[in-house]
Amino acid sequence: MSRIGKAEIKLPDKVEVKQENANIKVKGPLGELSTPIFEGLSIKTENGIVKLERSNEDQKVVALHGLTRALLMNCVKGVSQGWEKNLEINGVGYRAQKRGEDLVMSLGFSHEVVYKAPKGIKIDVLEQLKIKISGIDKQLVGQVAADIRSKKPPEPYKGKGIKYAEEFIKKKAGKTGKK
């Protein structure tokens, strides 16, 4: 029995959930999202609480029960509170700035690195070394953060590069030199 799948989802105020064919539509104050619902699963809503129910105990349906509940919970949180990721830039001369809707970064290359934010994602630059990525879709926010980090991942000797705010970079010892 899926413990995650059995857990109820309490809907915040102004959030609506309804099933349309093979999708679950979630509408809230920040926007609208949809997530797939797999065959053999259905949702039941009453008194602001959503439950996922299985039609049978088939192995595939049991496996997808917890996944569907987690995806639905991510949608509910996204349309009510939103998701955010924070990045930090470390390195002498490294910085970021907003130019219109684009993120422009100086990362030690001979050119500036320009990143265009996809629709539904908001990128803010706090100070010049901190980047905040926010949006309602958890997967898209995480993917944008990973794309920006991949422009200059942190290196293990000095820790220079772009890293997640909560990430710890384990530094290696450099060469000891000839004696």
Image: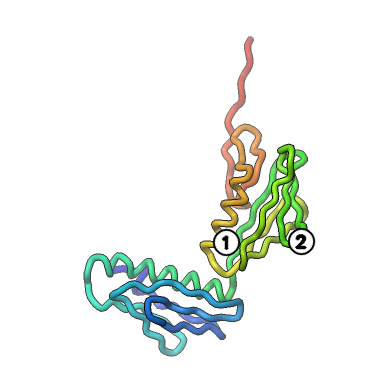
Dot 1 falls on a residue whose secondary structure is helix
How far across and down, in percent of the image, does residue 119 sit?
A: 62, 66
Look at label 1 and name its amino acid: Val
Q: Which residue is mark 1?
A: 141
Instruction: Give left or right: position of 157 versus 9.
Output: right
Which comes sooner in the sequence, label 1 or label 2?
Answer: 2
Q: Quadrant of the C terminus?
A: top right
Q: Quadrant of the N terminus?
A: bottom left
The residue lying toward the viewer, choosing from 43 and 8, is: 43
Q: What residue do we see at 62% from left, 19% from top?
A: 176
How far across and down, in percent of the image, does residue 156 sit?
A: 59, 35
Q: Which residue is mark 2?
A: 100
Q: What residue do we see at 74% from left, 37% from top?
A: 110
Tally the numbered discs: 2
Q: What residue do we see at 63% from left, 16% from top?
A: 177
Instruction: Give left or right: position of 80 versus 67.
Output: right
